[in-house]
Amino acid sequence: MAAMNYIAWAVVALVGYSIFTPLASLATNRIPSTVVALVANSMLALSAAAVIVYRDEPVVTHLTGENAIYMYAAGVFLSVGIIAYYRALGSGPVSVVVPIFGMFLVGSSLIGVAFLNDPLTAKKVAGIVLAAVGMYLTTS
């Protein structure tokens, strides 16, 4: 079986996140958001560990080295972002929280252009502007 390409993986991620968000919101109606975050993300960590074992990927060799700092920094920012996301889902409507959270796509795109040499095209600029307009319309 051929490996899925990045577009297929992105679609799987889209479906997973689309279903995850309302479920997390329902959970945080009765369960503290930090408990929901702990359980859901522990399941993520265990799933990642299972995939690592299945694929026989080394871990220890990647814990140090010049790129490891990016991995650790990513973990810090992911932790802050996800805990804040769960808190927002626990106190606000999904229809407002998700568009604001979803603006990370714009932020990440702009960081990619500014620091990772991703090309900035007219189509990307239009998409970023439309995303911002969409966020404004859905949250106001």
Image (cartoon, rainbow, N blue to C red):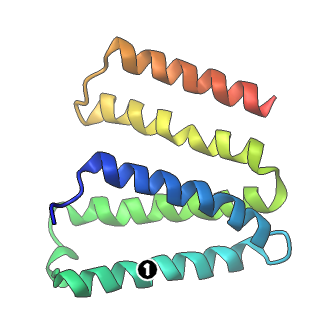
Q: Is residue 91 above or below residue 72?
A: above
Q: x, y (%) of residue 76?
A: 46, 64
Q: x, y (%) of residue 18?
A: 59, 54
- Specify whether residue 59 is in view: no
**Residue shown at 49% from the left, 33% from the top:** 106
Quarter of the picture holding the N terminus: bottom left
Quarter of image, res 99: top right
**Residue shown at 34% from the left, 55% from the top:** 9
How many residues crowd around disc 1 within 10 Å: few (fewer than 14), some, or many (20 or more)? few
Q: Secondary structure at mark 1?
A: helix
**Residue shown at 61% from the left, 79% from the top:** 38
Q: x, y (%) of residue 15?
A: 51, 55
Q: Which residue is mark 1?
A: 45
Q: x, y (%) of residue 20?
A: 61, 63
Q: Residue furthest front?
A: 1
Indicate left or right for 18 with 55 as reference.
right
Q: Is residue 57 above or below residue 85?
A: below
Quarter of the picture holding the C terminus: top right
